[in-house]
Image: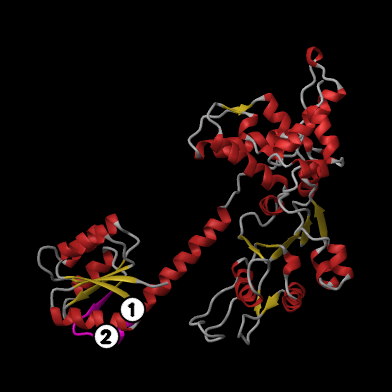
Amino acid sequence: MKLKILVAEDEEITLNHIVYVLEKEGYETVTARDGEDALAKIEKGSFHVLISDIKMPKLNGIRLLEIIKEKYPEIEVIIITAFGSIESAVEAMRKGASDYITKPFELDELILKVSKLKERKLMQRENTALKAALAINKKFSVTANSPGMKRIVTLIESMKGSDCNLILTGESGVGKSLIARLIHYSGKRQDRPYLSINCATLTEELLSSELFGYEAGAFTGALKTKQGLVEIADSGTLFLDEIAELSPNLQAKLLLFIEEGEFFRVGGVKSIKVNVRIIAATNKNITNLLSTGKFREDLYYRLNVMEITIPPLRERINDINELCLYFLKKHAPRCNKKITAFTSKAMEILMNYNYPGNVRELENIIERAVILENTNLITPESLPQKLSILAPDVVRLDAIKTIDELNKEYAMKIVEYLGGNKTKAAEMLGISRTSLWKIIKEEC
């Protein structure tokens, strides 16, 4: 975190000395020669700290402090006061100043005070992140009209009083992270931190640092001690997505942490004890990983106190309609569209697609349709062509087609889908190019 500091001082020599030493410490500085100039710069820019003399022309430091604390309370203020003016310093502290310094002062003293403010700012930022983690998506629901999802919701309900580690399995995009949040916010730790990380997105070294933190000087660039997610999530839940991507070394380190409830920061020599619930997830076949030795059995059994397998969307047909409406309500306002529902044909197409990308793919399809649609209903024309090309037609007694008609129509759709390439269309249909030509040209 690089502090941006505004220095308001009318004595040029003092101002130059302060700026020199602050910039030498790596801080970004802006100067002002009086109170009005300082206020104008604060109103135009963003600052973390204001260092201000009390006695300045046009607007004195006390009045400037009052205005700052009223309009910009997040800015920390250090007041500079003259020797023997302790009453002014007391007044400044009472009005919200973070600290004060008395002229003449040692520049090292000022640097120490600024350093303390920086630590306070860092702590505030971490607390803000933690509060956000505590509050994230507490109010959400899971669509569970299908038998498979109803079983999962019932299982989670029965686990409310439990605090065990568990592993979520299922194809990519089925909603494992949503289920993890539901488990956390339904359980005993719901008012404690919920943090997550995708184990497939970072290198082994970075992932180790993110999980377990590091000590200052542990490696090049480690200028100060950093807490890891395991430490920040103390008393709460840590969700490890794509856990099968962990290296053997990190698997061993995670196993030791789960067994002992303590860990070492990178470069640390002192163990840190925490109480964290682990929810892990993978889209891989865990049995194959165990048999090939790519995932440790002892770690698996430590995580697998409970295993929940989330079914793919193609096995949750009863959930599709409600999910479509949910994603429509989510994305229509974002796109400034007043779309309220789907045409019956569009919903029929959506219900008959097999969704290899599961719920994530469905949401992408609905978001795309919302962007493209110009009416107040989602129509088939707004859906991807891959969905509608093989969608079954609604059977009407007054428009029943012969087998030859259906064959011709189907073949023509395949040719159209492949951009007119009849050779590829014939291969896809499992017939010769000549047979395809006869089907298309045949009068029905």
Spot occupied by residue 266 in the image (x, y as percentages of width and height): 62, 82
Question: With respect to residue 60, does 349 lie above or below?
Answer: above
Q: Return the residue nearer the eye: 381 or 343.
A: 381
Q: Return the residue nearer the eye: 225 or 391.
A: 391
Q: Based on the displayed image, in which of its 4 quarters is residue 275 positioned?
A: bottom right
How many residues crowd mark 1 within 10 Å: few (<14), some (14–19), many (20+)?
some
* Label 2 secondary element: helix
Residue lying furthest right in this view?
291
- Does residue 75 appear in the picture of this structure? yes
How many residues crowd mark 2 within 10 Å: few (<14), some (14–19), many (20+)?
some
Mark 1 — residue? 113
Residue lying furthest top in this view?
398
Start-end of magenta stretch: 100-111
Spot occupied by residue 253 in the image (x, y as percentages of width and height): 72, 77
The C terminus, quarter of image: top right
Give the mark nearest the N terminus, 2 or 1: 2
What's the residue at 23%, 85% (across, down)?
Answer: 105
Please give left or right for residue 116 compared with residue 210 in the image: left
* Label 1 secondary element: helix
Does the magenta-highlighted stretch encompass residue 103? yes
Please give left or right for residue 94 compared with residue 254 in the image: left
What's the residue at 19%, 72% (across, down)?
Answer: 87
The amino acid on which the numbered mark 2 sits, given as a three-letter code, is: Leu
Spot occupied by residue 138 in the image (x, y as percentages of width and height): 60, 48
Real-space Cα separation, disc 2 to disc 1, in angstroms? 10 Å
Spot occupied by residue 1 in the image (x, y as percentages of width and height): 42, 72
Residue 107's disc number: 2
The amino acid on which the numbered mark 1 sits, given as a three-letter code, is: Lys
Does the magenta-highlighted stretch encompass residue 284? no
Q: Based on the displayed image, in which of its 4 quarters is residue 393 positioned?
A: top right
